[in-house]
Image (cartoon, rainbow, N blue to C red):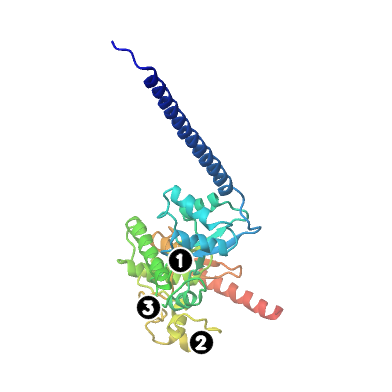
Amino acid sequence: MSATPPDMRKHASQRGGAIKSFLLFIVALGVLAVAAFGVGGYLGYREANRPGPSSEAVTILLPQGSSVSAVAESLKYSGVLRYPELFTAVVRVRGAENDIKAGEYEIPAGASVVEIIDLLIEGKSILHYFTAAEGLTSAQIIDLVATDEILTGEITVEPEEGELLPETYAFTRGETRDKMIRRMAAAQDSLLDDLWDKRATELPISTREEAIILASIVEKETGIPDERPRIAAVFVNRLKRGMRLESDPTIIYGLTKGEPLGRGLRVSELRGETPYNTYVIRGLPPTPIANPGSDSITAVLNPADTDDLFFVADGSGGHAFATNNRDHESNVSEWRRIERARKQGG
């Protein structure tokens, strides 16, 4: 083995020291970068979870197709966000660019960036409600839909009488009027799908359309839910026996198409021959006279087990029932006595 010259050993030592110093410098830079990243990350985390600037709840509307940056600017403009860049950065770090849902949102007072992002990803839009009362005609329901201030768009669908299920429907801003009407029609179809195969045997109706016609008459005869199965039973029993239904609301529909008559029926109207006068025609009228609710439809398909053939108002808001004409006439006399007493007292 040959010895290394002194000058070569010296140069090697210097070169090793330089490499070591360079490596220490690189490590120091790395430590500083990690530290800076850590400090930046911590500050960003703290700011993203810091309560927002709004002191009260704010409602915002995010249109369909809005970009993350557009959403951030909208939030800042609404006063619920300090730094839109931070909102955008957090969304991208979470990989949630495509998860923010359009809609109308209520941003709680003081909501942080993280809380706002979670809300928009969950898509918990503000719910609005549309209510159509049982017994309204299709034209009356269309008028309500047309004047609702939250629903959008023109009405182009034309539902037939009795095709809609009166109910309260939840919806989000942006839903169209046509869609609401179709939802109501679909809801009735779904209800009939559920009830039709469970209907009572030996009913004097053979189609869903006939069930809705009869249910609409039941709907207009009473506003008391507990009475509907018994009212339905009266009409079912009369149909089975070939008796006329003799329902005043059917006459009124023939005269006004379901609008309030504003007075009592005249004798001439009771005797008038119209397709809807069930004092004259036998069986059901040609169409429903209103849109029945689920209780009336259920009552018609599963009426009460009773032999009742008659009913008349009893003065309490309900009705007195009878299985024969003698008892019915007694109930009618009592009702007329109550009416006379009310007029004298008034």
Q: Which secondary structure lies at badge 1?
A: loop
Foreground: 94 or 182?
A: 94
Tell me the kind of residue under disc 1. Pro
Q: Position of residue 212 (x, y in %)?
A: 38, 69
Spatial separation of the CA atoms under disc 2 and disc 3: 38 Å
Tell me the kind of residue under disc 3. Thr
Spatial separation of the CA atoms under disc 1 and disc 3: 24 Å
Tell me whether the residue at label 1 lies in contact with that at label 2, contact meaning CB atoms closer than 8 angstroms.
Answer: no
- Answer above or below: position of 38 versus 199: above
Specify the label residue 266 is tagged with.
2
- Kindly report which numbered mark, 2 or 3, lies closer to the viewer in this rendering: 3
- Kindly report which numbered mark, 1 or 2, lies closer to the viewer in this rendering: 1
Q: Is residue 181 left or right of residue 318?
A: left
Tell me the kind of residue under disc 2. Arg
Foreground: 255 or 1?
A: 1
Tell me whether the residue at label 1 lies in contact with that at label 3, contact meaning CB atoms closer than 8 angstroms.
Answer: no
Specify the label residue 63 is tagged with.
1
Specify the label residue 156 is tagged with.
3
Q: Which secondary structure lies at badge 2?
A: loop
- Give me the residue at 56% from left, 56% from top: 83
Residue lying at the far top of the rendered structure? 1
Query: Taking the image as drawn, is residue 33 in sight?
Result: yes
Tell me whether the residue at label 2 lies in contact with that at label 3, contact meaning CB atoms closer than 8 angstroms.
Answer: no
